[in-house]
Image: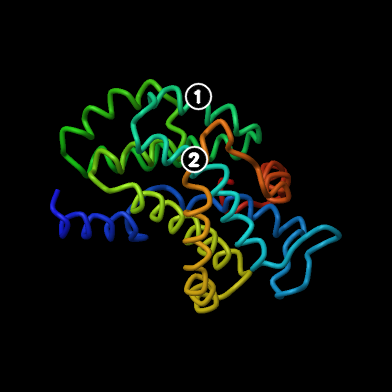
Amino acid sequence: MSSPEKRWLVWQLADSAFPAGGFAHSAGLEAAWNLGCVSARKGEAGGAHGVDFESYVEQSLWQMGNGALPFVRAAWTQERSLAALDALADSTLANHIANRASRAQGRAFWSTVARVFEVKGVRELDERARSTSMHYAPIFGATLAVLGLDERETLSLYMHASLRGTLSAAVRLGIVGPLEAQRLHAGRGALLERIVESCAAIEPEDAAQTFPLADACGALHDELYARLFQS
């Protein structure tokens, strides 16, 4: 794939119109918001041990970097089998809601890719992917490798999608408005760069949960009286 073709591919994958399944999930934000653990006002903690929304966003991004990015990169390098990485990802997601969401997002993402991109690498990957649980991070990394994107593009795109998904969920939950969400997105470029730089070399065995508040709240998602998101 030529450089211009890759550039167009990145834009297609980054576009919110690409049906990857992420907009059905809030990554724990809906539960944290409804349980009073997040405040919409900057500098004001939600609940006794909560955080303000901007802090929630930043800590969620660091969690993605430490907990998911190692699997994205390892799958992209193709130095380990996808099945082994998928099994390891499954064991690290002890929160049953997060585990279910990871599998659902991975399957939705792969289903779209398999239908859209008619290339040999995708067909070959499909045979390997079907024997796994299709956790999102490893299938994402493996997919972008066969589509020809380089490592940095792959990791950056994953983090971009993570930030966009959290902010989109916040808009639909009424935590922030669309313009405020875009302001927050625009001001997080340097943070995303730091996360990619800091977390790219983490091995999957060293993946860690760095934001227990979101994990604890997210585990209670199914207990909410009313739910807009799947997780």
User: Mark 2: which amino acid?
Assistant: Pro
Q: Nearer the viewer, residue 227 or 196?
A: 196
**Nearer the camera: disc 1 or disc 2:** 2
How many labels, in total?
2
SS state under label 1: helix
**Residue 143 placed where, x, y %?**
31, 39
User: Is there a contact, CB below 8 Å, between mark 1 and mark 2?
Assistant: no
Q: Residue at x 67, y 52 (%)?
A: 226
Left or right placement of residue 183 versus residue 110 in this view? right
Asked which quadrant contains residue 184, the reply is: bottom right
SS state under label 2: helix
The label number, if any, that marks residue 70 in the structure image: 2
Q: Earlier in the sequence, mark 1 or mark 2?
A: 2
**Residue 153 placed where, x, y %?**
33, 53
Q: Residue at x 63, y 51 (%)?
A: 227
User: Mark 1: which amino acid?
Assistant: Ala
Residue under pointer 1: 87
